[in-house]
Amino acid sequence: MSRQPPCGAAEARNRLKMARAYLEVASLAAEELIEEARNVAAGNAVLAAIAASDAICCVRLGRRHRGQDHQGAVGVLRLVRPDGGKHAADLAAVLTIKDSAHYGDHFIGDSKLKATLRATARLVEAAAVIVSDT
């Protein structure tokens, strides 16, 4: 079930704080030399990307996606002007790793993790800029 509850600047600031914290944990885990740490890093990157997307949507749309289907969040983020398409593409790319990171039984490769972290960092940075304008 998909819901789009209303939200605004206060919620956006909180979601941005969470996005930054998840990204920080993801970055720390990515530095570890054990292969399972890549999954931990990717899992936290996914959470960071979702939180950043929520922050963007709260400011620009006054609502955010909530529901089991995270692809719905991509559709809502695409509605943001300007740059919704670019942000939605980054979120979609990050979400491709969600199941493997959170529920998979194989370890995520280094190049896939790096791409995920880059896309997540772009979303968090965009959210920071957008939230700072409020």
Image (spheres, rainbow, N blue to C red):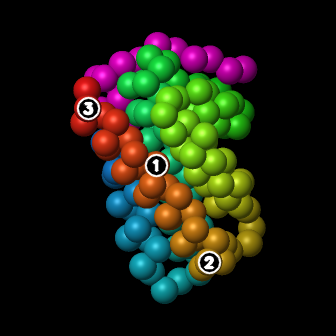
The residue carrying mark 1 is 123
Callout 3 amino acid: Asp
Q: Residue 49 location, x and y as percent? A: 50, 48
Residue nearest the viewer, comparing 116 with 25: 116
> Which residues, given as a range, are shown in magenta?
1-15
Q: Is mark 1 on a helix, strand or loop?
A: helix
The residue carrying mark 2 is 111
Look at 53% across and 58% down and name the residue there: 119
Callout 2 amino acid: Ser
Callout 1 amino acid: Leu
The alpha-carbon separation of the residues under discs 2 and 1 comes to 19 Å
Is 97 rendered above or below residue 86? below
Pick whichever of labels 2 and 1 is earlier in the sequence.
2
Q: Residue 126 location, x and y as percent? A: 40, 45
Q: Does the magenta stretch include residue 8?
A: yes
> Tag on residue 133?
3
Position of the N terminus by quadrant? top right
Q: Is mark 3 on a helix, strand or loop?
A: loop
Look at 44% across and 71% down and name the residue there: 29
Q: Characterize the local packing of mark 1: few (<14), some (14-19) or many (20 or more) Cα atoms within 10 angstroms.
A: many
Look at 64% across and 71% down and name the residue there: 112
Pick whichever of labels 2 and 3 is earlier in the sequence.
2
Q: Is residue 8 visible?
A: yes
> Tag on residue 55?
none
Q: Residue 13 location, x and y as percent? A: 29, 32
Q: Characterize the local packing of mark 3: few (<14), some (14-19) or many (20 or more) Cα atoms within 10 angstroms.
A: few
Q: Nearer the viewer, mark 1 or mark 3?
A: 3
Residue nearest the viewer, comparing 82 with 50: 82
